[in-house]
Amino acid sequence: MRILTGADFFTGLFYALVLRGEKVISLEGGYFDEAVDRSFRKLMDLSEKQGIEVSFRIRLHPIYGDSVIIRQEILGAMQRGLVTLDAPGNKVMRIRLTEDEAVALLEEIAGGRELFMRLTDEFNQ
């Protein structure tokens, strides 16, 4: 079993979004949190079959629909230079990777390209 951390999950999701041509993502209105939650639930469905041990959990707040873990991982991705947030209000996130970088780096993450492309399908529903 390979371990997948929260940082790995978000990194892989961002890489796969770049491969789908999505480098600018709105953080307004809870869409992003809901989309990440769908992707996470799909990951949980597939993890055992893929030989992946998921070392984190995502839970949306029952009233506000957001997640502390998602906010923490966005900040971590910013610190690693993967994303930036546009002012004012930090409501637009830009992924700072090229397609070539995404292809090369995605294979290093547990689950690889195939898994994360499936997770982006869930993200985009």
Image (cartoon, rainbow, N blue to C red):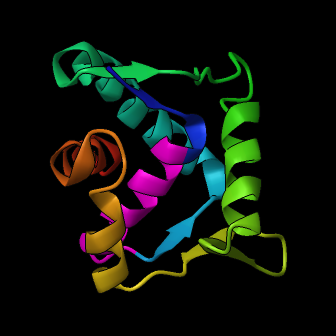
In the displayed structure image, the side of residue 17 where residue 33 appears, left or right: right
Q: Residue furthest right?
A: 88
Residue 102, image quadrant: bottom left
Q: Residue at x 30, y 51 (%)?
A: 124
Q: In the rendered view, tell whether residue 122 sits above or below residue 117.
A: above
- Dominant secondary structure, magenta: helix
Residue 74, image quadrant: bottom right
Residue 113 placement (x, y as % from top left):
21, 54
Residue 62 placement (x, y as % from top left):
68, 15
Residue 18 forms part of the magenta stretch: yes
Magenta region:
8-22
Q: Residue at x 73, y 55 (%)?
A: 76
Residue 88 placement (x, y as % from top left):
84, 80
Q: Is residue 67 visible?
A: no
Residue 37 placement (x, y as % from top left):
48, 31
In the displayed structure image, the side of residue 51 where residue 63 appears, left or right: right
Q: Residue at x 34, y 55 (%)?
A: 108
> Depth check: 16 or 105 in front?
105
